[in-house]
Amino acid sequence: MTNLATVPIARLGAPASAPEAEPRRRWLRPAPDAVPRARRRPRIVYAAVAIGGIAIIALAQLLLTIGLSDGAYQVSAQQAKLKDLSRTNQALSEQLTAFSSPQNLVQNAQALGMVANGNTVYLRLSDGAVLGSPAPATSANAPITANQALVPNSLLQPEPVKAAPIPDASSAPPAAAPDPSVPWQGALPSPQTH
Amino acid sequence: MTIAVLIIVAVVSVFCVRLVDIQIVQADSLNAISLASRSDSTVTLGTRGDIVDANGVVLATSILRYAIEADPSAVAEFERPGPDGTGEVKVSAEQAIGELASVMGLEPSVVTAIVTADPTSRYALISKSVDVTTYNAIRALDIPWLYYKADQSRTYPDGSVAGNLVGFVGADGSALAGTELTQNACLAGSDGSEVTETGEDGVAIPGSTVTLKKAVDGGKVQLTINADLQYFAQEALAQRVTEVGAESGTVVVTEAKTGKILTAAEYPTVDPNNVDATDPAFRGAKVFSDPFEPGSTFKSITAASLIDAGAATPSSQVMAPYEYKSGSAVIHDSFFHPDMPWTLTGVIEQSSNTGISMLSNNMSVDQRWDYMNKFHLGKPTEVGFVGEDSGDILPGGVSGPTQLDDQTIYNTTFGQGLTVTAVQMASAYQAIANNGVRMPVQLFEGCKHEDGTVTDAPPTSTGEQVISPQAAQDTVHMMESVATTGYAADALKIPGYRVSAKTGTAEMSNGSGAYGGAYLTSMAGMAPSDDPQYVVSVTIRKPVTITSGLAAAPVFQKVLSQALKTYRVQPSTVPAPDLPTTY
């Protein structure tokens, strides 16, 4: 193997136009070392960056895991809460639907002294005519009387929800005598829609 | 030196072999064991669908109930946080049992007996089903040897309102009766399952949930029933049935133009929340399943057929005797009278058996049977309700109407010797009320799924012209005379409305081929007569104090008034035609 280091540079192909006037022998020498100070500093920076990076990644991973598991506990707690709330919701809706059953409503309406009127009467807006035969409702001619024994609802056991107490008769407004004829005077109020 | 190297090599190779064994050879089975200890498999419940009325009022819905179980082997003293939230207090087993019993409303001795029956056992059932309030109270006791299991249960908020139609489910959740059974395919949900990996403390590891099977909720079944009207009818019927000392009764209300059943009331009716309280005979829907001989309310159907066939008109004349004999048949009227010159209208108004029998001679028996078939008698309705009966218009197993004996031929003109269900009767009247067009009977609006799609909706139908519009209107007008001048007229009047009705007092068969002296009184009709909107049919079985159509009349009047009020039907404006009843 030819030792290239020992070959004069000229032989390696110096420019043809190079003056050969002074045949000076020039030998290759080992390149001088880089300035030691300038090369040592980057190494520490790289190492610090690499190690720091790893540390940051590890820390981020740790925080992420902590966050995630913390979230899992939160999710678990919220799910338990949701379960509790939906249980409460169910208990309350069960009560509500039982309270809104016809048995309960009719019984309470009756306890308040309300009577359904069997006579249906309509007021015709076009000419103010009263259709049907108006008659006051009395408990004697009420079409039905609530009776839990006949149309039972065991959800209302042992007894239906109590309505507010019946107001004192003396404090109730005096019943106006019904006037079967309702004459209409003037134009009827009707919405002006186009 | 070499020996030391060799030892190290040997030890390292043993470790390597073991490592490969654990990590590769046994990896699968070890992973499975590990997963099993971490993973928690749960059943996700597919909720059974609701049953609602025409307005969305919930008649049946699913709720959670809790089973309370104990581990008797662990019953001992324990500690729980003090009442002020700080420190721990000791609770003895007796004290815990006492608290548990008082929350559950049981005797402490009962609970003690359950948990001490076998102290080595790991399982004892204290209660199969407690409600949410009780469950929360029990959990607040913090008793470590109790376990809970949630399970689906059914509740019926309106109790016995439409209980006959809604039906009920068994303790295991299986459908047993009514709509619950008829529409079970729609209502039933299917449970799903999922697996979650959990940590030591039972908290789920994020992202580890695997759904193996998705839970599917059941569909919602909507009925054509109006729950408020149904309640009204049940209450009115029940009061009348008890008043006249009867055994039972039914009320069916249908919409004349659509054939939808708005009310199908019965007394007694099962309260699906408490099935055991009702006699097993009354746990079903008798309006569909219990056929009966209708009696005189059937005369309207015979009259409508006669008019449609051109065999009679409302003014057709007949000299009706008290007793009419033809062949081997002997027909009597229900009250004694001399020979009366009645028109067909008069026959309907007076409910004369001899009159309708004689007029029906103008029409062949086969023809009459054709009309019965067109009125859809003798076959189940389109509803397809569980246990629905088809009624029987060929009594005695004879092969055809022409084979019937003389007595039965005449009896069938006034509704004896054949059977119909309450819904079939209401449907026949619906055809008369709707200008002769019979609409398919409808109880279900369809099955509404979670995603909003509706399946099993009944096909839209324009109905079937059973009799001509003229024949139908004539029949309605003839029936009006029952409500204006008939014997029950006072009980039938609805102020402002024209009402058409027909009374009925049928003799009930005693079950062995003879009539046993018990009656089924009925009333069927429609209003307003100038343009019928609602059809009401009432039957009261075996009344004691009143045995005529008067027993059923007040119920008919009240329910019809309520229907007219509920649906805001305007009072009649056209006066009733004055059809002559005599000549």
Image: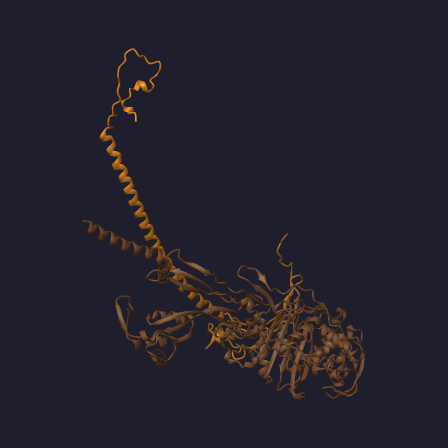
Nearer to me, B71 or B299:
B71
Q: Is residue B25 above or below residue B489?
A: above
- Residue B518: x %, y % from top left: 64, 87
User: Quarter of the image containing the C terminus of chain B?
Assistant: bottom right
Q: In the displayed structure, does residue B243 sit left or right of residue B35?
A: right
- For the point 66% across and 84% down, the residue is B548
Looking at this rendering, what residue extends furthest in the left direction?
B1
- Residue B390: x %, y % from top left: 65, 76
Instruction: Classify residue B236 by image quadrant.
Output: bottom right
Q: Is residue B316 above or below residue B257?
A: below
Instruction: Classify residue B478 by image quadrant.
Output: bottom right
Looking at this rendering, what residue extends furthest in the top direction?
A21
- Residue B262: x %, y % from top left: 61, 70
Question: Is residue B67 in view?
Answer: yes
Q: Is residue B446 above or below residue A54?
A: below
- Residue B579: x %, y % from top left: 77, 75
Q: Name the image colouring.
A: by chain
Instruction: Classify residue A120 by image quadrant.
Output: bottom right
The chain shown in orange is which? Answer: A
What is the display colour for chain B?
brown
Question: Is residue A120 in view?
Answer: no
**Count of marks overlaid on the render:** 0
Q: In the displayed structure, does residue B283 sit left or right of residue B91?
A: right
Nearer to me, B172 or B319:
B172
